[in-house]
Amino acid sequence: MNIKEFKDKAISGFSKLTKQEKLEWLLSNVFENPREVIREFAEYWHKDETRQKVFDEISENTLTNFYLPYGVAPNFLINGKMYVVPMVIEESSVVAAASKAAKFWLDKGGFKTTVLSTTKIGQVHFKWSGDAAKLRAFMPELKLSLIQGVKHLTANMEKRGGGILDIELIDFTDQEENLYQLRASFETCDSMGANFINSCLEEFGKLLPEFIRANEAFSQSEKHSEVIMCILSNFTPESLVRAEVSCNVEDFGLVEGMPAEQFAEKFAQAVRIAELDPYRATTHNKGIFNGIDAVILATGNDFRAIEACGHTYAAKDGQYRSLSHAEVKDGVFRFWLDFPMAVGTIGGLTKIHPLAKRSLELLGQPSAKDLMQIVAAVGLAQNFGAVKALTTSGIQKGHMKMHLNNILANFEANAYEAERAREYFLDKVVSFASVREFLDKLRKGAMGQLKA
Ligand code: MEV
């Protein structure tokens, strides 16, 4: 197909169509069985139109709702307070593993968490061809003028205890001709702060060229500056939380049949491998994000921002490494996670999504700092569960139970068939084909033909 043919197939004004019209367009253009698809899409609309409207308006071109399971992990003891943590995730075994890890640490003192800092960062990238030393000398004046110039935006945040903390000039001219950056730091209290920060930055983006133009100290050729872009940074290494668990090694007792000391050493060795090898670190951290993303989603926060920040932090010394660390010292096992994140418990989706609101209620209306600590504790618990399984019984045992349930649901097994299948596959490898064979034989009354 040439470009003209592609263009002939393109649709303009799609966003302006009603939901029904959008579906009709799809009907004639994409699906093989469009009537069936329209019926199915409509099945997932909320029965109450007002509530459906809330979801329709969260994004654009919405056709239906995409369901994900909403579960809870009980028994999380964090800084002496019990939590039932909401988790939204599509992967089986994650909620079960988090719950199991929470219970495991419950009688060992639970999770200890600390918010180390909450500073967020925003940047104005600009080009300027003047004398860098002169610009540096004017920074205190420029900073004051920028902070004054956005007072109308910061007044409310200041009342809540937040606002602009600092503005620095960063010189990139050794790497890129004439390139500079204003790096501003912010405190955004209980909101994630994206809108607040970006609004301030865009205002800085207007004020900065005016300041340079109006300044008598700059020569005519220095009066021009060009703002390239103004945007927050999702890398927030100074919005940092630590979660930690520890116990005497002997308190482990037997772990899946493994003596306490062997388990503790093997566990710490596994974490060390993830500190050394990026291939393992990626999977190890993915396990941490299984827990983190699930809570972030359930509370209506931005999981892409959290992921991006966490991965950059994992590579902060130039190599991608484990986000968690473990040590065994003087008979004590310690396992901890330092995790940077920007979360909010007011504003954004937390205000709009009815279930995000319920999640926050379930967590006792946490502040952003409280939520950071809960999220980090769940990430650490998830990581503990995965590494514990990997270094003892292996990961497949737990996964296979859930996998079997999914396959049984796929074959519409009834309660009797499911029970028989669970008994039969207790010591066998679960696969789609083996479960189908089992059910076929069970349904035909030919169980004797199955190999024991
Ligand atoms: C699976 O979703 C996550 C794990 O692979 C994490 C890990 O290997 O540590 C089990």
Image: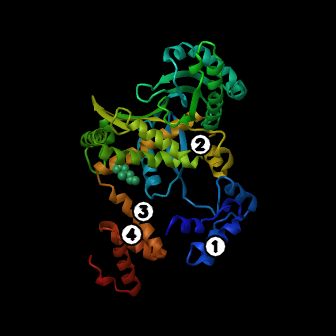
Q: Is residue 27 above or below residue 79?
A: below
Q: Do we see residue 158 in this rendering? A: yes
Query: Circle 3: is it few (<14), some (14-19), or many (20+) Cα within 10 Å?
Result: some
Q: Three-letter amino acid code at disc 4?
A: Arg
* Position of residue 102 measured from the top left corner of the image (x, y, whole percent): 45, 45
> Badge 1 is on which residue?
38
> Which numbered disc flags the more N-terminal residue, 4 or 1?
1
Circles 3 and 2 in contact, beta carbons < 8 Å: no
> Which numbered disc flags the more N-terminal residue, 3 or 1?
1
* Position of residue 6 measured from the top left corner of the image (x, y, whole percent): 54, 66
Query: How many discs mark residues in the rendered view?
Result: 4
> Badge 3 is on which residue?
402
Which mark, by number, is residue 363?
A: 2
Q: Three-letter amino acid code at disc 1?
A: Ile
Near-viewer residue (258 or 128): 128
Circles 2 and 1 in contact, beta carbons < 8 Å: no
Circles 2 and 4 in contact, beta carbons < 8 Å: no
Q: Disc 3 to disc 1, how far (Cα)?
A: 31 Å
Q: Do we see residue 321 in this rendering? A: no
> Which numbered disc flags the more N-terminal residue, 3 or 2?
2
State left or right for residue 11 relative to residue 84: right
Near-viewer residue (340 or 25): 25
